[in-house]
Amino acid sequence: MVFRDISPVVRRRFPDDHAFKTAGFLTEQELSAMESVTSPHAKYWLPIHWAFHLIKEAKASGLIRTERAVELVQARLLEFRTSLAKQRAAHGVPVPLAYTQVVFIAVRSYLALTMIGQQYVIGDRHKEILTPIDIYIPLLSILQLLFYLGWVKVAEGLLNPYGDDDDDFECNWFIDRNLQVGFSIVDGAIGKEPPLEKDVFWNEIIPLPLYANGVLNAPIHVQNDSIPKPIRLVEKIIRSSLTSEKINSTVAEHNLESQGNCFD
């Protein structure tokens, strides 16, 4: 429902709520329940409300035993709702229209004037030059044309990343992929877990993973700490400890001498 309001591609696929029912995302009863709720705003919250009601029924019927489990499931739903709200809010605050118009007109006007204004014109004063000037291709103007138009095209592509351009997000693919993977998780993967057994690294303390022949001799850049080991600090600590030991021994000897003088 959120993708339908922020992506024109999804809007063409699902023009109304009845298209959800035709595609199998809604049942007849769910569509009737959605239409029975009157709200001046979008009903993104309604399926999440149904999910919270199902959690409540699962807790009452004993399918969910602890309150902690209920809290964790509800927290996941709240995270999902927050993600939807962020997507909707990001789409609801677009780049100001005046800015896009100014950039569009300014760049193209500058390029049109540059094509005319930076041409090399041969006048009477160039007849006195012994060596002729052979400037036929305005290289700098061509580079400006490529750079400025390229930057404008990139900015125009970033205005709505959920559009129907080639570089935009494939929202329809996201919907299809999530639906298929979700059904595979809850239906296709249940009961097909492998048995727990010892692996090949069971008796090895520091295992050496296997590499293919193509990457066997490839260099491996070990990730080391950016700060070296504090060798000097260790030396200072050792020296200070040795110094403190000398001081303690000197004090002890002085105390013994003073005690001996007292006995004398």
Image: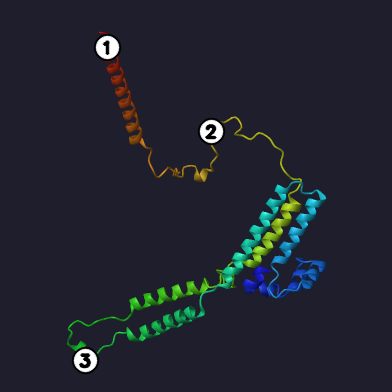
N-terminal of the pair, mark 2 or mark 1, is 2
Percent x, y for residue 10? 66, 71
- Looking at the rendering, which quadrant does residue 40 occupy? bottom right
- Please tell me which residue lies in front, 233 or 20: 233
Determine whether the residue tagged by mark 1 lies in a helix, strand or loop. helix
Callout 1 crowding tier (Cα within 10 Å): few <14, some 14–19, many ≥20 = few
Asked whether the beta carbons under mark 2 and mark 1 sit within 8 Å of each other, the answer is: no
- Please tell me which residue lies in front, 67 or 146: 67
- Looking at the rendering, which quadrant does residue 132 occupy? bottom left
- Please tell me which residue lies in front, 86 or 123: 86
The amino acid beneath tag 2 is Ile
**Number of the front mark, 3 or 1:** 1
The residue tagged 2 is 206
N-terminal of the pair, mark 3 or mark 1, is 3
- All told, the count of numbered labels is 3
Callout 3 crowding tier (Cα within 10 Å): few <14, some 14–19, many ≥20 = few
Q: Which mark is residue 262?
A: 1
Q: Which mark is residue 124?
A: 3
The amino acid beneath tag 3 is Asp
Percent x, y for residue 218? 46, 45
Instruction: Report, in whole angstroms, how far the alpha carbon at label 3 lies from the one at label 1.
Output: 117 Å
Residue visible at 29% across and 81% down?
135
N-terminal of the pair, mark 2 or mark 3, is 3
Residue visible at 63% across and 74% down?
8
Q: Is residue 128 above or below residue 82?
A: below
Q: Is residue 187 above or below residue 224?
A: below
Percent x, y for residue 178? 68, 60
> In the image, 121: left or right of 58?
left
Please identify the quadrant where the N terminus is shown: bottom right
Determine whether the residue tagged by mark 2 lies in a helix, strand or loop. loop
Instruction: Report, in whole angstroms, how far the alpha carbon at label 2 lies from the one at label 3.
Output: 84 Å
Determine whether the residue tagged by mark 3 lies in a helix, strand or loop. helix
